[in-house]
Image (cartoon, rainbow, N blue to C red):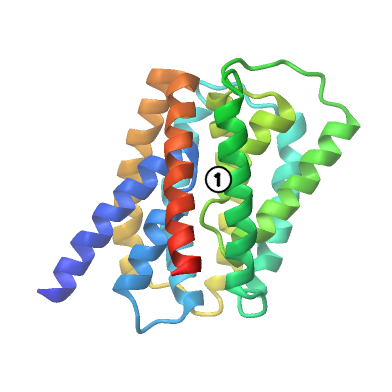
Amino acid sequence: MHVEYALVALGFFAFCGGLIDAAVGGGGLVQVPALLHALPQYSLATVFGTNKLAVLAGNLSSILTYVKRIKIIWKLMVPMMISAFAFAFLGAVSVSLVPKKFMEYVVFIILIAMATYTFAKKDLGRVHLKQNYQRKEILLGTCFGGLIGFYDGVFGPGSGSLLLFVFVKAFGFDFLNASASAKLVNLGTFIAALIFFIPSGNVLWTIGGVVGICNIAGSLTGTFLALRYGSGFIRVFFLILLVFLIGRMGISIFL
């Protein structure tokens, strides 16, 4: 009974994580703590590996829906995805080497800055600004892809939200296009991490499968809401999520 209860609870949090992740990213801050609580007997690498399997399934389902409705800027996206893929693998390899607390402090500060800026700039991300993406923008995207990819490999939660903000602030995307593009970059980071986690035996397939199915259901719901209500909805949802993430990480760091 205890095992069944734990799976039901994991399924609920996975649905919520998938919904949040599909719309604005950051679903890992819901799903990873739930896995850590349900699987205390397993290593951090195994929890992260199982989580990557589940979120990969949810991410794929949302991408298939987004690409039919959103015009993807492949000229920018391809080098960014390749960079994120490579550095996510390095991050996964470095899981045991990089202090978790250090990563939490860095991301905590970044989240506060993102929330403050997004709240202050009322029109940020409401309109998609068409730009002529040249070498400078592509190089910048490659650098951002590498940095966030490494973070996603070594820790992960919140990487989708970081990517969404980068697309909006640095490249002039509206929130809807930014959300779809962030999913493509995350697709590479999840696969790269699993290339390390699977051969090293750090994936629980049964639990990952159950959590993955629930994550898919949440992702489809989140994608529907994002496409139905557009960038204004995503902006509000994004700010709510940032406040939640800041509060949750603050409690983890200071209490």
Q: Which residue is mark 1?
A: 160
Where does residue 210 sit, x and y in percent of width and height?
29, 60
Secondary element at image label 1: helix
What residue sits 69% from the left and 30% below the top? 169
Image quarter hosting the N terminus? bottom left
Above or below for 87 versus 206: above
- Indicate left or right for 192 with 50 as reference: right
Q: Nearer the viewer, residue 44 or 195?
A: 44
Give the quadrant of residue 236.
top left
Task: Give the residue at the far left of this rendering.
Answer: 1
- Indicate left or right for 15 with 152 as reference: left
Query: Which amino acid does the dot numbered 1 rest on?
Result: Gly
Where does residue 50 sit, x and y in percent of width and height?
43, 67
What residue sits 35% from the left and 84% below the top? 41
What residue sits 55% from the left and 65% below the top? 194
What residue sits 58% from the left and 47% below the top? 111
Task: Give the residue at the far bottom of this rendering.
Answer: 41
